[in-house]
Image (spheres, rainbow, N blue to C red):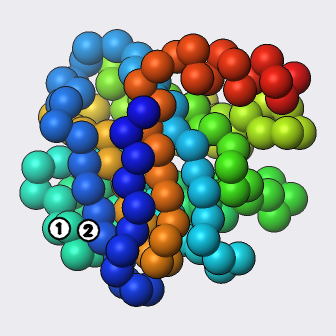
C-alpha cells in the first residue's frame, strides 16, 4: 500500500502516478482507500497528462479529468454532477477506479460497509478528447490530514471485501 497524507492546510495539491497509460491499450483498474480528516473533506480522482499543474485540482484545465468525492466531474474548469440521489464517497471505503483507454471511458465503484456500489457507470462517463492521449492515474486533495491510499496488494481488497460483504 502506498499512503499519501495532505500536510497543507485547505489548498489544492495534485499528484500523478509514474506509470503512464498509453492510448488504445485496454482497460485499467486501480484501487484506493479514503480516510477523511474532517467532515468537509475534498478530493478528486482521475487522470492527467504530464502537463498537470500540481497546485490546482484535477479538471481545472484541459490537461486533467477528475471525479470528486461528491461525484462531480471536472474538466477544462467546468463541473458536471454525476451523483444519483446525492450520494457521496464514504470515508474508509475502497474505491475501484476503471479507465478504458480504447474508448476514453471512466468509471468508479465503492466497496463499503453497505456493499458494492457503482458510483459512476463507465458506460455513461465518456471523456472528451482523451482517447488519443498518454495519461496517468492522478488525484487531488484539499483538507489537511486527508489520506488516500493506493492499494498495491489485491489481498487487501479481497480481505476488506470479504469482511464487508
Whether residue 34 is visible to the viewer of this picture, yes or no, is yes
Whether residue 80 is visible to the viewer of this picture, yes or no, is no
Residue that carries the numbered disc 1 in the rendered image:
53
Q: How crowded is mark 1: few (under 14 residues within 10 Å), some or many (20 or more)?
A: some
Q: Is mark 1 on a helix, strand or loop?
A: loop
- The answer to whether mark 1 and mark 2 are in CB contact below 8 A is yes
The vertical placement of 150 against 65, above or below, is above
The vertical placement of 139 against 113, above or below, is below
Disc marking residue 113: none
> Left or right of 68: which side holds 115?
right
Residue 38 position in % (x across, y down)? 65, 76
> Left or right of 67: which side holds 140?
left
Q: Residue at x 69, y 56 (%)?
A: 91
Residue 99 position in % (x across, y down)? 43, 29
Question: Total of numbered circles in the picture?
Answer: 2
Per the model, the C-alpha gap separating discs 1 and 2 is 9 Å
Residue that carries the numbered disc 2 in the rendered image:
61
Amino acid at each position: 500500500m502506498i499512503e499519501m497524507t495532505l500536510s497543507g492546510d485547505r489548498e489544492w495539491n495534485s499528484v500523478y502516478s509514474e506509470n503512464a497509460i498509453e492510448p488504445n491499450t485496454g482497460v485499467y483498474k486501480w484501487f484506493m482507500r479514503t480516510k477523511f480528516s474532517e467532515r468537509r473533506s475534498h478530493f478528486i480522482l482521475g487522470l492527467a497528462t504530464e502537463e498537470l499543474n500540481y497546485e490546482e485540482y484535477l479538471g481545472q484545465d484541459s490537461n486533467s479529468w477528475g471525479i470528486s468525492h461528491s461525484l462531480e466531474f471536472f474538466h477544462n474548469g467546468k463541473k458536471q454532477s454525476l451523483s444519483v440521489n446525492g450520494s457521496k464517497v464514504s470515508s474508509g471505503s475502497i474505491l475501484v477506479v476503471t479507465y478504458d483507454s480504447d474508448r476514453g471511458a471512466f468509471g468508479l465503484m465503492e466497496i463499503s460497509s453497505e456493499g458494492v456500489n457503482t458510483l459512476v457507470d463507465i458506460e455513461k462517463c465518456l471523456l472528451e478528447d482523451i482517447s488519443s492521449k498518454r495519461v496517468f492515474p492522478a488525484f487531488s486533495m484539499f483538507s489537511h490530514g486527508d489520506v488516500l491510499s493506493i492499494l498495491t496488494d489485491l489481498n487487501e481488497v479481497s480481505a476488506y471485501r470479504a469482511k464487508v460483504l
